[in-house]
Image: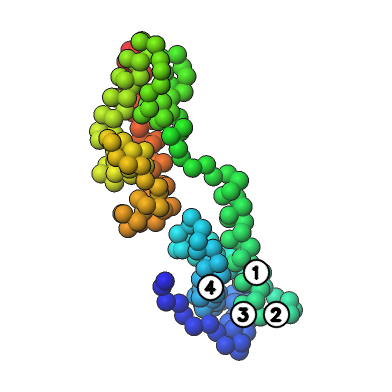
Amino acid sequence: MKTFLSPFTPEQENDCLQKMKNGDQEAKKELILRNMRLVAHVAKKYQNSDEDMEDLISIGTIGLMKAIATYKENYGSRLATYAARCIDNELLMHFRAKKKTSREVSLYEPIGTDKEGNQISLLDIVESEELDVVEELEKKRQTRKMLELVPAVLNERERFIVSQRYGLYDKKPMTQREIAAALGISRSYVSRIEKRALEKLRKNFQDEKNQSFL
């Protein structure tokens, strides 16, 4: 973890708070920097979550900034005590919102539609079910087309992530965390790259399908 500046003494903190009240923006920045160690300390409570530690610190810093902007001496506690609650609240709100709205990209993610207008997912493309002869041939054609699109439209990192995530080309499927460790990047960054890659595949698959009808 990165090294942070030492906290202010009570006297230094009060002096900086007074300067900030008088409009000194540098004092405000200094208060933030001197309390970053506190942000990291609170964020460590959530280090076993799926979030990267740097992302947690960034979210916690928002809580710190809110604390500095709203703190009043008559609260009966030092800024650090008040800020710790604000930082924790910010992180909790983040996890609640994520739980409510997040949806892991999966094999069921739609990437296009079939000839009858039904949505097609990666699962439909990669795996084959018992179909009639015409549908079987169409499914195989779409599978070949999708596997051709992967190297054609994705860059090297996107190809690696999509291939490993979904076990394409006889690869063993990997989790986002396993891929992140292999590439030396954060899990959240893997998730962003994966979603971008799937959007590319979806768009190109649909574009080629539309062209086939022209």
Using the image, tell me which numbered label, if any, was put on residue 167. none
User: Taking 205 as reference, is 96 left or right?
Assistant: right
Identify residue type, mark 3. Answer: Leu
Residue 158 in the image: state x and y as whole percent: 31, 43
Using the image, tell me which numbered label, if any, was put on residue 85. 1
Asked which secondary structure carries label 2, the reply is loop
Identify residue type, mark 1. Answer: Arg
Q: Earlier in the sequence, mark 1 or mark 4?
A: 4
User: Taking 199 as reference, is 93 left or right?
Assistant: right
Nearest to the eye among marks 3 and 2: give it. Answer: 2
Identify residue type, mark 4. Answer: His
- Kindly identify which residue carries mark 4: 41
Residue 186 in the image: state x and y as whole percent: 39, 56
Q: Are marks 2 and 4 in contact (CB under 8 Å)?
A: no
Residue 58 in the image: state x and y as whole percent: 49, 63
Q: Are marks 1 and 3 in contact (CB under 8 Å)?
A: no
- Kindly identify which residue carries mark 3: 17
Identify residue type, mark 2. Answer: Ser
Quadrant housing the C terminus: top left
